[in-house]
Amino acid sequence: MNNELKAYYLTELAAAVDAENKGDIDTAFRHLERAHILSQKFAFAHAATHLRMLRLGWKTRDTREVFGQMARAMAALLVSRIWVPVGNTGRANVSAFEPMAVPEDLANVLGHQKSSNR
């Protein structure tokens, strides 16, 4: 993960913590979804994002989210470098295999990541 991508990823994680501390769970999950999109191709960051979603699911007593994130965290460690459904938000309420549209601002960051890795 290059420095620019890492900065965006860490910003999303920090925003999720801030929103959670303010009791705004929906916004916290939105920031974790964005962090998930940014981290998909990096196994440890990808799995860490799922673990944060699991923790938030546990806090909100959302059993679907908790069990969904357990499976996704393990899968993230195993398949992140092989294949990911680009743009997938990582939540348990969506298919783990469904590619999704990437928000434009994140697409710009990820586009830069691709060109800097060549």
Image (cartoon, rainbow, N blue to C red):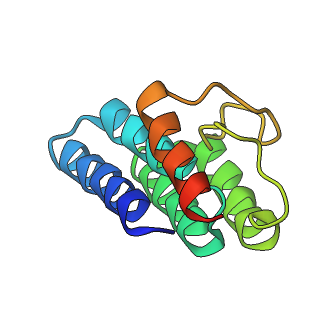
Q: In the displayed image of the protein, which residue is found farthest to the left?
A: 22
The x and y percentages for residue 80 are 74, 63
Q: Nearer the viewer, residue 83 or 64?
A: 83
Residue found 41% across the figure and 32% down from its top: 105
Q: Position of residue 110 (x, y in %)?
A: 53, 47
Q: Residue at x 66, y 37 (%)?
A: 88
Q: Quick check: 5 left or right of 99? A: left
Residue 72 drawn above or below residue 25: below
* Depth check, front residue: 13 or 1: 1
Residue 37 x, y percent position in the rendering: 56, 45
Of residue 102 and residue 53, the one placed in the foreground of this image is 102
Residue nearer the viewer, 72 or 40: 40
Q: Tell me which residue sits at (66%, 60%) in the image.
A: 41
Image height check: is 18 above or below 97? below
Question: Left of 108 or right of it: where is 83?
Answer: right
Looking at the image, is 26 positioned above or below residue 62? above
Identify the residue at image location x=37%, y=68%. 3
Residue 43 can be seen, yes or no: yes
> Measured from the top left, where is residue 11 in percent x and y?
28, 54
* Image quadrant assignment for residue 101: top right
